[in-house]
Amino acid sequence: MARRTLTVVAVARLKPPPTGRDEHWDATLPGFGLRITANGKRSWVLMTRLRGELLRYTIGAYPAIGLATARDLAKQALHLVAEGKDPRDERKRRAEQRVGTFAHVATAFLERGARQKAGTRWVSEQTRIIHREVLPRWGTRPIDKITRRDVIELLDEIAERGAPVQANRTLAVIRRLFTWAVSHDLAPGSPCVRLERPGGKERARERVLTTNELRALWIAWNVAGIAPPGTRPKLGLIFGVYFKTLLLTAQRRGEVAAMRWSDLNFDGGLWTIPVSKAGHAQEVPLAPTVVALLRSLPQQEECPYVFSTNGRTPVSGFSKAAATITTASKVTGWRSNDLRRSAATHMATLGISKETIRRVLGHSETDVTSVYVRHAWIPEKRVALEKWAGFVEELRRKE
């Protein structure tokens, strides 16, 4: 077996054979060489003996793997052989660890989201969809075995049970998860490329509550109005203040639910959302009415959250509370997100500028100027929210 010292220049000059394949062995590292086939394919190889048997081990393709790296990988394989281990088994084990199951990758994806967007609705919504719709079906499967057909079948099943919007949301979450997994070398590719939303184009919800509806809801949010029979009065108090705060601050449902005592400055009348859905901190001025409402809530021992029914996690169970409120108020077809939209719409009728309303809502800024302009708009937002709270106070007086 002819040997020569393989160098970068020498390797680049090697020519494919007319037929079959040639193997060029390195004089400096026994058993290490470059295989070249007649069609020009080049691979680094190692030939040695493992427990008395001949072992041919393909290290990887050239030029994707350079000479120095290939020689180091060959040395590592020889060390494994010296310990009685097969480098092919070790490679398979590492590949399995790198790919992992869908459940493993999904957990890492959600943990990353929880770190970056802690306390936002993004985290709870992504978690809910993955745990409810996806993990029961794909949890134990290797992520690299999930195909485009698998995604289509899952989405079709969701849409066929009468939940086309949920199917759209599920596709968005799966697509986002795979994009993240590919960027972190946890999946070889995404099965969601060019998939269309199974539920079709969604129309934006346009429900704006009238002043009469807001008045009726406010009455129902009082403790006696929303505490279901047989429940603790504290439950009614928490949900009552929660929905009132949602309306008066015009913030997102998940962000209000995750409000922490440590984020509140009652003396300064300011609530700081550490990371909003827009991806940045949001400072929300609190009108005196809101400060009084929040002060009325008891601080539960060792619970960081302002709104909590169990003393450990943020308040949940919005649909059940909303159903009770609907019965008490006779206002039908409303959702918690409608309160935010209604607040913005009514603030516009009060003469508050569109730009200020956008700042109150905490919408993302996409223009280049936003990178340089760091004005927090706190004075303008405070005037707007206090004016809005005054408007709601006038509605209450008409009860």
Image: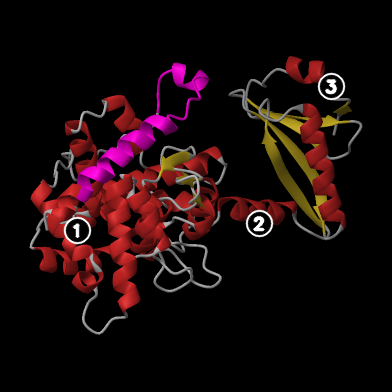
Q: Residues within 10 Å of mark 1 (few under 14, many from 20)?
A: many
Where is mark 2, residue-wise?
93
Amino acid marked by disc 1? Trp
Element carrying mark 3: loop
Report the Cα–Cα distance between label 3 and label 2.
31 Å
Instruction: Specify the principal SS of the magenta part.
Output: helix
Where is mark 1, residue-wise?
218
The first of marks 1 and 3 along the sequence is: 3
Residue 189 visible? The answer is no
Residue at image position (33%, 29%) is 356
Residue 132 visible? The answer is yes
Report the Cα–Cα distance between label 1 and label 2.
61 Å
The image shows residue 129 at horizontal and vertical percentages of 35, 57
Q: Are marks 1 and 3 in contact (CB under 8 Å)?
A: no
From the viewer's perspective, is the residue at label 3 or at label 2 nearer? 2
Q: Is residue 380 left or right of residue 161?
A: right
Q: Are marks 1 and 2 in contact (CB under 8 Å)?
A: no
What number is the disc on residue 7? 3
The first of marks 1 and 2 along the sequence is: 2
Q: In this view, does 91 lie to the left or right of 315?
A: right
- Residue 378 covered by magenta stretch: yes
Residue at the extreme right of the image, as rendered: 28
In this picture, which residue range is highlighted in magenta?
365-393
From the viewer's perspective, is the residue at label 1 or at label 2 nearer? 1
| Image: 9 above or below 324 | above
As rendered, which of 49 and 1 lies closer to the eye? Answer: 49
Q: In this view, does 286 lie to the left or right of 157?
A: right
Amino acid marked by disc 2? Arg
Residue at image position (42%, 63%) is 314
Quarter of the figure that contains the C terminus = bottom left
